[in-house]
Image (cartoon, rainbow, N blue to C red):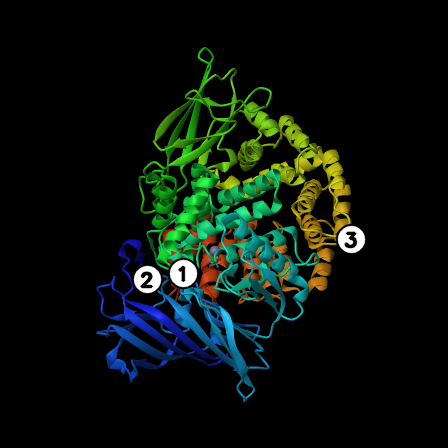
Amino acid sequence: PQTIYRKDYTPPSYLVDTVELGFDLDPARTIVANRMTMRRNPDSAQREIELYGENLELVALRMNGNTLSEKDYRIEGSLLTIPDTPEEVTLEIETICVPEQNTTLSGLYTSNGSFYTQCEAEGFRAITYFPDRPDVMAVFTVMLRADKEKYPVLLSNGNLVEEGELGDGRHYAKWEDPFRKPSYLFALVAARLVCQEETFRLKDGRDALLQVWVEEGNLDKTDYAMQSLKNSIRWDEERWNLELDLDRFMIVAVGDFNMGAMENKGLNIFNTKFVLANPRVATDIDFQGIEAVVGHEYFHNWTGNRVTCRDWFQLSLKEGLTVFRDQEFSADMIGTESGRAVGRIDQVRTLRQAQFPEDAGPMAHPVRPDSFVEINNFYTVTVYEKGAEVVRMYQTLLGREGFRKGMDLYFERHDGQAVTCDDFRRAMADASGRDLSLFERWYSQAGTPVVRAETRYDEVDKTYTITLFQSCPPTPGQTSKFPFHIPIAVGLLGADGRDMPLIIGGKDAGPTTVLELTEPEQSFVFENVQEQPTPSILRDFSAPIILDFNYGDADLLHLFSHDSDAVNRWEAGQRLAMGRLLKLTGEAGVGAPLMLDDTFLLALGKMLSDEALDPAFREQALLLPSEGMVAEQIEVVNPMSIHLARQFMRANIGARLRTELLAQYQANQTPGEYSPDALSAGKRALKNLCLAYLTAAQDEEGLQLAQQQFDEAGNMTDRVAALSALIHARAPGAEAALQRFYDEFEDEALVIDKWFMLQASAATTDVGAVRSLMRHPAFNLRNPNRARSLISSFCAGNPVQFHAPDGSGYAFWAEQVITLDALNPQVASRLARAMDRWRRYTPELQEHMKKALQQVAGQQRLSNDVREVVGKALA
Ligand code: DPP
Ligand code: ZN
């Protein structure tokens, strides 16, 4: 496969002004007529028209009214070139595609018999020939024709301008999108759906029609998505002065979808997982996800659609920024300081669990990649979550107001354009008058920077010096790195646990100050420091780095009890736990007896029972680092030792904090009507963590409570938590509970996904059990949610069984990657990433893993997607 480089970017040879699309929708044979007006791009030296098309049958091609024959153009792979074309051109193209055979779920496809599209990144070329690149922006008019009985609802981007009957049982609808847009934002839906709708008054007084479209029978699950949409519109107006620019905004839920959702202009298409919810079927986490994703896609209307990307290397321009915006939205919706901190802790956890490993593995790439084989492989935690951290750092460096000025300037300059990450950085720099040239390295250099800190207290001078050293490990293609511009937020705690006032260079610097590290090594001196402080470094996780500081237990316990910065308070607990997990893992590895010290347990017990703290925060503070996070800290990973160590610790906590856990289990009940608000969700989270610890210890009362909670729960959060506790504890009632759960929710696809996932990720489920679950009538490899719920949950979420010493987990992985690849390369390629870190395991496991990787790589027929991932893993 061919590698595409960022440095090879050239402007499009032709621009497209208008596109008129006509669809005669038929699952077996859809005819697409495309009429576009084009003109030569003054910024290009090329004189040929370049169009992309894939899996299309070309029926006719006319230029300025004349039919072109095969000698008038060339087709090489997916590129169609027409040489020597005039200045202005009208092209008419007729093609045929077969939606019902499109299992890739990219382009035009059918799901449960209806039509949907997914065009990002390069799906539009499977619909018609087009200069399918984000820097070609055109005005689209779309005519849809389809059987009225089967497809009563016909939707596309923008405004409905005409609809009617065609006589032969078919009907039509014509849609016009007034805004220029790149082809990746095109969408259509032709389906049997119903909607919840509402008119909503915008800030400027206009009324907009909001609709959430779902299959019949799901109308009882659309309230939260609608509410989240309204909140998103309001929030974008208030926080950024950004308004909805259309008269109508639609969300459509579809059961077969590769991603979470898609921000098509005015017609967002969503994975059902991020639309459908009510207390019976959705958990607190599901509700949170819906709010975040509805917000995310809505916010794309400005950061992504109005201002889009010049090329796909700039993906983080819209994704990093929009993730940052949805994170801020969710935080503002909670509204409290502690709620905001809990959200931030979740973000840090995601980074450490998923992004840091990516940045340290074979697929490591900068936030703005330099090359790719398949762009679909670069919708990553690095582009999204690390990209959001990069945006957050601007706000940390410039302040909220300065950042807002930068955003205003960005829209003022670039509305209606396709731009780059450099354009965004320039807007931030120009609006604030700051030199952000070094900041560019966050976009160009991969790898997680390590910042080592050394401190020195001078009792005579009353100064405290923090010296910071930065480095960044090599990543594929980048052996050495330049220093980054890193904001490090710091506070100093006195012996009383209070923040000391900070004085730097004679100036008051508040309780928290942001140190700007730009050199390999830099010292910062705090003055008038009356006693030896405990440093709280990297407050609020002010940069996506690894902080290397030799904290002693006493320091960590002090921070865990007192730090005014909730993120670092949590972090101190994580460090205490990680130190013990690593020690226990070593001991488990050699069969030594395992022991957990009182000091740590006492600190946990105190935190657990501190009712001055939000339950949501206490839950975070008590949650141990995952097995995957422990693995990242170890040179030679033996997943079984990690599992034994962590299980021992959980059981020990459950047994020795039994009284406190039972008390908090009772104290955090949420009787009455279910509400997904942050306080109630936090109580449920803490209560259910208590239950998990108690059952991990095989506590009789705990097991009874789990059974009782499963039997009586009035909401899915408590239901699934109880079921999980029963399964993980191998409780006698687990099997019966699983069966009852299935029977009760058989018709709720998203709940059945949970049912598969719970089993796939239980350490008791081996590869044989997964294979028999694959034979269950409810299993369906073609549905991405279902495939992920069983296969990905096992390969990426059940380390002990996946890494079985005989290599059977890896053989299963290879088999599934190969099978899935023939159906849906995007889903297969995600699954392929489960092997990213194979070089870190024991030599025996490595050997099995390498064999499995080679087996996949050796396939004759393999998508570019999977070939790139396994190729990089083996390189
Ligand atoms: N639909 C994906 C997202 O919103 C890709 N743009 O992030
Ligand atoms: Zn996005």
Query: Relative to residue 447, is residue 329 drawn left or right?
Result: right
Task: Locate residue 334, reporting x and y percent.
Answer: 61, 45
Residue occupied by mark 2: 1
For the image shown, how many numbered marks are present on the structure? 3
Q: Position of residue 20 (x, y in %)?
A: 41, 75
Q: Residue at x 45, y 50 (%)?
A: 321
Q: Look at the numbered disc 3 and give the secondary structure of its residue.
A: helix
Q: Quadrant of residue 151?
A: bottom right
Residue that carries the numbered disc 1 in the rendered image: 865
Q: How far is the residue under mark 3 from the one under mark 1?
A: 46 Å
* Gap between marks 1 and 2 measured at Cα: 10 Å
Identify the mark nearer the N-term, 3 or 1. 3
- Disc 3 marks a residue whose amino acid type is Glu
Q: Secondary structure at mark 2?
A: loop
Distance, label 3 to label 2, CA atoms, is 55 Å
User: Helix, strand or loop at disc 1?
Assistant: helix
At label 2, which amino acid type do we have? Pro
Mark 2 vs ligand 1: CB below 8 Å: no
Which labelled disc corresponds to residue 712?
A: 3
Give the percent coordinates (x, y) of residue 731.
72, 49
User: Decide: marks 1, 2 in contact (CB < 8 A)?
Assistant: no
From where the camera sits, is residue 425 visible?
yes
The amino acid marked with disc number 1 is Asp
Image height check: is 468 above or below 388?
above
Image location (x, y in percent) of residue 258 = 50, 62
